[in-house]
Amino acid sequence: MKKDVVTILDNASGRQIELPVKHPTQGPAVVDIGRFYRELGYFTYDPGFLSTASCQSSITYIDGEQGILQYRGYPIEQLAKQSHFLEVTYLMLNGELPGCQQLDDFNGVITHHSMLNESLKSFFRGFYHDAHPMAIMVGVVGSLSAFYNDSTDITDPRHREIAAHRMIAKMPSIAAASYKHTIGEPQVYPDNNLSYTGNLLKMMFSVPCEEYHVDPVAEKALDLIFILHIDHEQNASTSTVRLAGSSQANPFACIASGIAALWGPAHGGANEAVLNMLAEIGDVTRIPEFIARAKDKNDPFRLMGFGHRVYKNYDPRAKIIREMCHEVLARLGDENDPMFELAIRLEEIALSDDYFVERKLYPNVDFYSGLIYKALGIPTNMFTVMFAIARTVGWVAQWMEMIGEENQRIGRPRQLYVGARQRDYAPVDKR
């Protein structure tokens, strides 16, 4: 019987090894190179880990060529249309969709944990008034282990579950409190009668002296965006959470590390970059000029929010959010805002211009989510915070999966050293 292996021949030494091939339930096969260094003395070199599977996971599946995204095997299109954020959250944490009673119980648990310890108010006051909300998020989330050290024993499955629920429940409260701090308004307590996203909107935009009503379109739009952003396989922030978790750090510290990684403009700041680009273009009449610049290889200008590193087809999340974006703009957007008119015109061009179609530079989820956030009145410095709220579910699910593995080991990437060879120290007067 033929072995399912890849044979490696080292021409320098004449040695040969057979490496086993592992087959996933979906996607390309993977070569197990665990013996590669031990038997041949070589490391593999893969900057950016573009061809390296850092783990095995049963949470999220992506096929960038076909434009497929699945959570626990469920197509994102079905979940976005038929489910809601907390139901998908249950799915991500537990592997299966909940029954009615399970969903009610889960909603109750998340609602129960949404309040913050009152002592945290002093922590928020320690930040400058103009601190970036993501800076506050990193600090406050990292501090939670000091407030909730009754659930930091990562060897205890019940502790892990409690920590997961607390993190997901408190993230909107932390995000809203971070925003209120930067605008000088008092924190708003969560309302147990509201949905997850409705509660977030109220905590962000209500004030104690006035009654607040959650707009159902805004609530629905946020719920959809959060579903689409829950997880995206082993991206930079998720890999950071896993690497931090492999050291057996407490879960709050691990999620704080993910927030820090997400903060980078190349990762979580893409939707903010879209609005900055639209502001740079400024007017519909200047679109041809910027389209020409985007096509010019010698011009550094790039159309932000178009194309994707993983998807070589239409981003499936963009297809879903596009309709919601138009609904939100029609209901809540300022029809006189030139930025919205610009965005719609750019979208039309990208979907019809041969240059963009041939290169598959379609509008991605960041293009639409930034426009929705702006229409909802969410400031640009809160865009990445919104991303972090949703992605916390994925981070927690990935962390729980990793910690629960048998023979789990600390992450320890190797390197290609290109520094100086060994040399001897010389006294300062001899240099």
Image: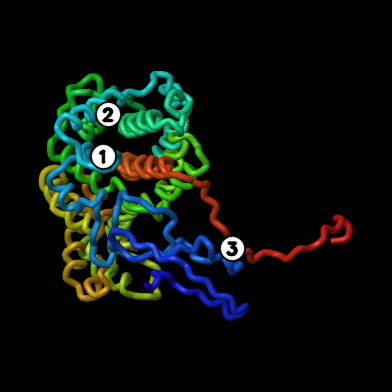
What residue do we see at 19% from left, 72% from top? 353
Q: Quick one: SS at disc 2?
A: helix
- Residue 198 position by quadrant: top left
Amino acid, disc 3: Arg
Gap in Å between the C-alphas at discs 3 and 2? 47 Å
Q: Quick one: SS at disc 1?
A: helix
Amino acid, disc 1: Thr
On the image, the x and y values in percent for residue 285 come to 21, 65
- Visible residue check, residue 186: no
Do the residues bearing badges 3 and 2 touch, measured as CB atoms within 8 Å?
no
- Between 294 and 91, the one nearer to me in the picture: 91
Q: Quick one: SS at disc 3?
A: helix
Q: Which mark is residue 110?
A: 2
The disc, 3 or 2, on the residue closer to the chain's N-terminal end is 3
Gap in Å between the C-alphas at discs 3 and 1? 41 Å
Q: Nearer the viewer, mark 3 or mark 1?
A: 3
The disc, 2 or 1, on the residue closer to the chain's N-terminal end is 1
Left or right relative to 341: residue 229? right
Gap in Å between the C-alphas at discs 2 and 1? 10 Å
Amino acid, disc 2: Ile
The disc, 3 or 1, on the residue closer to the chain's N-terminal end is 3
On the image, the x and y values in percent for residue 41 come to 61, 67
Find disc 1 in the rendering and name its residue. 89
Q: Nearer the viewer, mark 3 or mark 2?
A: 3
- Between 397 and 175, the one nearer to me in the picture: 397
Q: Residues within 10 Å of mark 2 (few under 14, many from 20)?
A: many
Color style of the picture: rainbow
What residue do we see at 17% from left, 47% from top? 79
Q: Residues within 10 Å of mark 1 (few under 14, many from 20)?
A: many
Q: Which quadrant of the rendered structure holds the C terminus?
A: bottom right
